[in-house]
Image (cartoon, rainbow, N blue to C red):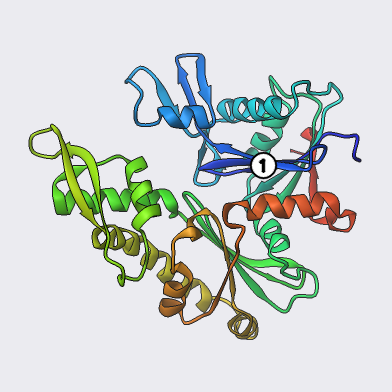
Amino acid sequence: MLFKNVYGIDLGSSTVKVYSLSKNKTYMEKNMVAYKGHTILAVGNEAYEMFEKSPENICVESPMAFGMIANKELTEIHLYSMLRRMNRVLRRRGASMYFSVPLDMTAVEKRAYYSIANGHFLRNNRVFMVEGPIADALAMGVPIEENPGNMVVNMGAQTTQLSVIAGGKIIISKTIPMGGRQINEAICAEIRKRYNLHIGTRTARRLKIVMGRLNTDKKEARKVVGIDSLSGLPREEVISSYVVTDGIRSCVDRIAMEMKIFLERIPPQIRGHIAGEGIYLTGGSTRLPFLNHHLAMVTGFSYKLSPLYEMATVNGLEKLIHDKELHKWAVPVKQRTL
């Protein structure tokens, strides 16, 4: 197996993570593609540097939307670009690709994953699909088979996935269309309402990282430059951490309320075990300080925050690739079965 090209691939709305078995290393890049007409200008981190800075005739966008493939061609180009950077010569006999995928996909959505691995640029690849919550559980050491009931929450860039694993399978799940990007947009809206200032989502993301915290004990302020809502001219403004926190809290509280409704649907015996064990929390958006404490206060359940954050899913794929006993969680996909 060491002489084969084997990859674990997590196609996220914000970033793409690829684990290479031959190099025993994980690579991560922004899930962005910049193009003009039919010409690709930049891919990955280079394209993200152009985001919100490019002229009108250049499009910079993510080929993923809400955890699903929105543009098959751009997704294939992005994946091919990453694999070429990792291995300059891609073998003609192909590779084994383990994709982490959302739950309850249709045949059309499964075909999209197969097509990007066997399309115009990539050929002769064997495709395996691993459900995202299973990969997260493997990364966080959650027992899957002999499991009386555990809840795994992944807060990503555009979605928050709630899943309950019991008896070796996912018994109930729900996807909330809210994540890090919606939090960024909420910060933009709050600043526009308080200061009459338009800022970009990249600026909002920086404010979220620097000042975003769900406790208001620490007072901070930062200078930002935006567009005045009245004059349309650039203006500098000092933004308070309270404003940023209000934008964050509006989204997090909505997620917490959805989690409370979801917890009420879980059978009492399993819910009792989850209450004693705690809810496993992971995903890129869980980097917000004191997020687990805030969710615990709203929902009444304790949380176990994973230190892997957005790398949890690809780390679970890495464990699955190395352990043959875990391969039963990877479902092979062939074209004739789609």
From the viewer's perspective, is residue 100 above or below residue 137?
Answer: above
82 shown above or below 88: below
Q: Amino acid at mark 1?
A: Ala
Give 2 or 107, whichever is nearer the viewer: 2
Q: Residue at x 41, y 27 (%)?
A: 50
Left or right: residue 167 compared with residue 298: right
Q: Position of residue 197 (x, y in %)?
A: 17, 44
Residue at the spot 74% in from the left edge and 22% down from the top edge:
88
Q: Residue at x 36, y 59 (%)?
A: 212
Q: Quadrant of the N terminus?
A: top right
Q: Residues within 10 Å of mark 1 (few under 14, many from 20)?
A: few
In the shown orientation, is residue 28 left or right of residue 196? right
Residue pointed to by mark 1: 107
Quadrant of the rendered image containing residue 290: bottom left
Quadrant of the image for the C terminus? top right
Horizontal relation, residue 269 to residue 4: left or right = left
Residue 108: x, y in percent? Answer: 63, 38
119, above or below 304, in the image:
above
Residue 218: x percent and y percent?
31, 68
Identify the residue at image location x=47%, y=77%. 296
